[in-house]
Image (cartoon, grey):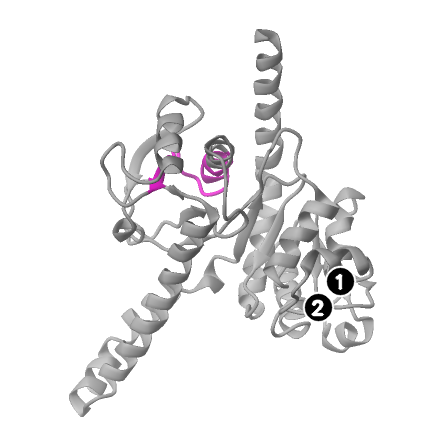
Amino acid sequence: MIRIGVDAMGGDYAPKEQVEGAMLAIQKIDDIEITLYGDVEQIKALLKNDERIKIVPSHYVIPMGEKDPIRAIKEHPDASMSMALASLRKDENDAVVSSGATQALIAGAHILVRRMQGFKRTAIAPLIPSVSGRPTILLDSGANLEIRPEHMLQQAYFAAVYSKEVLGVENPKVGLINIGTEDGKGRDLDKEAFHLFTETDLFDFYGNVEPKQVLDPPCDILISDGFTANIVMKTIEGTAKGMGVILKKELSSSLLSKIGALFAMKSLKHFKKAISAEEIGGALIYGLYRPVIKAQGASKAYGFYNGIRQAATIVRSGVFEKVEARLKEVKANESESE
């Protein structure tokens, strides 16, 4: 059985959506068991089916707007998030899913889960929709505002393995987000990363990709520093919401528009589904000892179920073990050449 730990108290609608998402996951996925960390009374009141689900009591909830996440993690080992994360190092779970405060989860992951051996910088990597219908990996979307090119190389390699093993892309290509497609564009960081990526045999490097191509990219993975990629991610989210509002307004502006909307209802539902974060589940934090999935803070039951499904798929695929083995191989080769 794959063991999934769930921070049942983190998120805008906790614990209701987390508990319902867990029950849905048990119903749909045969090879998992779930541990819910949180307030026992609140969880029990919502838990209608406890098949392969157990509860571990916690006594604190890290607020969504926590200003000092490191302090919160260190001072509250009894928090639902802290207990879920700590379970990975204790080998009580194989993966953890949380929709709690992002910075607290990243801080907690560093302190309580820790990086896999040889991995220099973790990264948070959501999947974003594309015109092709196949999701694109975007990293780093906020864990490292400043980073070195060699750390980006590790992250891109992790993404390539994830893309192949989890998303089923046979030969994933990596693109570097930049202000132009030509060689030599961008900041010193972009130029150095471009040079490093061009020389590596760890993955197939496409080259520079402009932001206007983000939703129809010529590659499977898009990478930049955390500041840039976070702006890209939030721009996509804001544009999708804005387009949705404009579309809804236009379709209700006249009788003919309303009639047209009725005929287009199926297509509109497909459009909404294509841009919905609920369909993806969450963002994987790369480079940790074990998988941690950051589900959206506003996740409902279906979105949280998808986060659990995503975590189970990652464990089954052995992505973390494959990357860790490769890092050890690289380190051994470096030691031999010294």
Furthest-front residue in view? 188
Magenta span has 85? no
Residue ID at (37%, 41%): 220
Give the amino acid type for the residue marked by disc 1 in the picture: Ser
Which stretch is magenta? 158-177
Near-viewer residue (137 or 62): 62
Kindly indicate the quadrant of the structure image that contains residue 164: top left
Q: Residues within 10 Å of mark 2 (few under 14, many from 20)?
A: many
53 vs 266: above or below: above
List the residue tagged with mark 1.
80
Residue 2 visible here: no
| Secondary structure type for disc 1 | helix
Tag 2's secondary structure?
loop
Pick whichever, 68 or 63, lies toward us.
68
Q: Quadrant of residue 242?
A: bottom left
Residue sticking out furthest to the bottom: 255
* Residue 155 coordinates in the image, percent (x, y): 50, 37
In percent of the image, x 26 and y 77: which residue is there? 247
Residue 182, image x and y in percent?
A: 22, 35
Q: Residue furthest left?
A: 256
Residue at image point 50% right, 44% down: 146
Residue 169 magenta-drawn? yes
Discs 1, 2 touching: Cβ within 8 Å: yes
Sooner in the amino-acid sequence: mark 1 or mark 2: 2
Residue 176: percent from left, percent from top: 35, 39
Q: Amino acid at mark 2?
A: Met
Q: Farthest residue toward the top?
A: 337
Q: Residues within 10 Å of mark 1 (few under 14, many from 20)?
A: many
**Residue name at image x 42 percent, y 50 percent:** 229
Name the side, left or right, on which 279 lies relative to 78: left
Q: Which mark is residue 9?
A: 2
